[in-house]
Amino acid sequence: MAPIALWAMPGETREQRDERMRWWREARFGMFVHWGLYSGLSGTWEGKPVGTRGGMEWIQERVKADTGMYAKRAIPLFQPKKGFAREWARVAKQAGCRYVVFTSKHHEGFALHDSKVGDYDAGSVLKRDLVKEIVNAVRAEGLRVGYYHSVIDWHHDQYEYGRSKQLPHPLKGKPYPNGQRDHSKYVAYLHAQVDELVSDYGPVDILWWDYSSQDFQGEEAWRAFELMDKVRAKQPKIIMNNRLFRIPQAGFSGMGTAAIAPRLDPKYGDFITPEQHIPTTGMPGVDWETCMTMNTTWGYSEHDRAWKSNETLIRNLIDIASKGGNYLLNIGPKADGSVPAESVQAMEAIGAWMKGNGESVYGTTAGPFEKLAWGRCTQKRGRNGRTRLYLHVFDWPGDGKLTVPVAVDQSASAFLLAGRKKLAVTAGERGTAIAVANDAPDKIASVVVLEMNGSPRVV
Ligand code: H79
């Protein structure tokens, strides 16, 4: 047993941590949702596009609007329709996502629940508890649910944005409009809202904090350890990311979204968070999740047409799974809560692929190969005790022979996952050849299963 002091939660052993992380490690695929007041502005300010690329959930910062002006423009546009959350949950479910993480509050500061400690929230403004609607809808589909919660806040009048040179704020560099601020009052508000979120909506599976800087993080910025302790007191099984911190021990090597360090002391969180980026290799011993947009913005923008192809999205999911990570794929619903048609279509395509091939993703671990000429590989132990390599073929061989750089014995067998068609295996010391048809069964990724006794020996 690992020394208890190594593990974050009082008394949590390595085994208990593995048990707590199990569903998340098996899930491999989740849906991210960015939705708030910015969704109604949809990348447009005073009739003009703010840009065609980049995160339009940042529009308040991009146009340097104070919170009063921003709220005045954005609130009238934010009109969630009845039952919108059921649409989200259906989209996630049919795509094969196992969990949904949505913005309980983004940097703009508008909270989607009905808060008793503030008046900039859906309860106060719309007389609706949107968190309740979303959590209930997601749970009804049998999916896990989590909050993205921004610790940065561009609304609260005690948030001392002057204390960080690195964290964004629309009024950065300008004096506080209300005179002196007391950041501890903002932190008390942050803690109180989080407490509402983890107390009033049943089980919460994930807390996805966003974000900290090298010059303002952790204890100083958010009373982070106390905040995590409070969350765990109400939700002992919850899984939290690392973004209340920005230090190397918490998985950060710098300020960029790709500046990740392949290490994580569990006292800083449960997983690390490459953003818009897939690490080039896996990170043994570290749980990680790549979050990504389908176009280039998280919050809805009517101007962003840069949609990734279905091929890219599906291959990203496979690439990430082959390196032992999770894929948190974003949708940015419109102000009425409807999901953009492009995103619905993409999620359906992923779902169609997962329907036949999900076994090669769920519950798998990183493949044994550093690099494969034709695609990617995941693995798991089959029910019969044999090792299964899931060979994801992106570039299908033209000569009827798939060559796998692994040595197997005569007991090895292979089949095409979709349809279970058996394939002939020729074992050799310098690699294994699997006889396949001339045409790729799936243009995006065909999965060939190679089954063997014992562990694969890479050659
Ligand atoms: O919630 C999403 C982003 O809003 C948030 N994290 C994800 C999950 C995020 N915070 N900081 N960053 C992302 C990195 C900063 C990116 C920036 Fe930009 C690029 C800031 C300015 C240029 C993208 C484009 C965001 C605003 C404009």
Image (tube, rainbow, N blue to C red):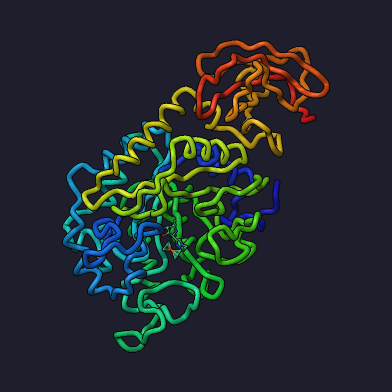
Does residue 112 appear in this view? no
Instruction: Kindly give the residue lying farthest to the bottom in the view shown.
Output: 179
Q: In front: 83, or 400?
A: 400
Quadrant assignment for the C terminus: top right
Does residue 426 appear in this view? yes
The residue at 23%/74% (across/down) is 68
Give the vertical position of 164 relative to 7 (above or below): below
Residue 224 appears at what percent x and percent y?
50, 67
The residue at 63%/20% (across/down) is 398
Q: Is residue 334 left or right of residue 440?
A: left
Q: In front: 132, or 330?
A: 330
Point out the quarter of the image occupied by ligand 1: bottom left
Instruction: Kindly give the residue lying farthest to the front in the view shown.
Output: 398
Number of callouts: 0
Give the vertical position of 106 relative to 304 (above or below): below
Residue 392 appears at what percent x and percent y?
59, 28
Q: In front: 149, or 443?
A: 443
Q: Is residue 145 left or right of residue 407?
A: left
Instruction: Kindly give the residue lying farthest to the right in the view shown.
Output: 429
Give the vertical position of 218 relative to 241 (above or below): below
Q: Quadrant of residue 208?
A: bottom left
The residue at 65%/45% (across/down) is 282
The residue at 74%/23% (across/down) is 454
Residue 325 appears at what percent x and percent y?
57, 43
Residue 253 appears at what percent x and percent y?
63, 63
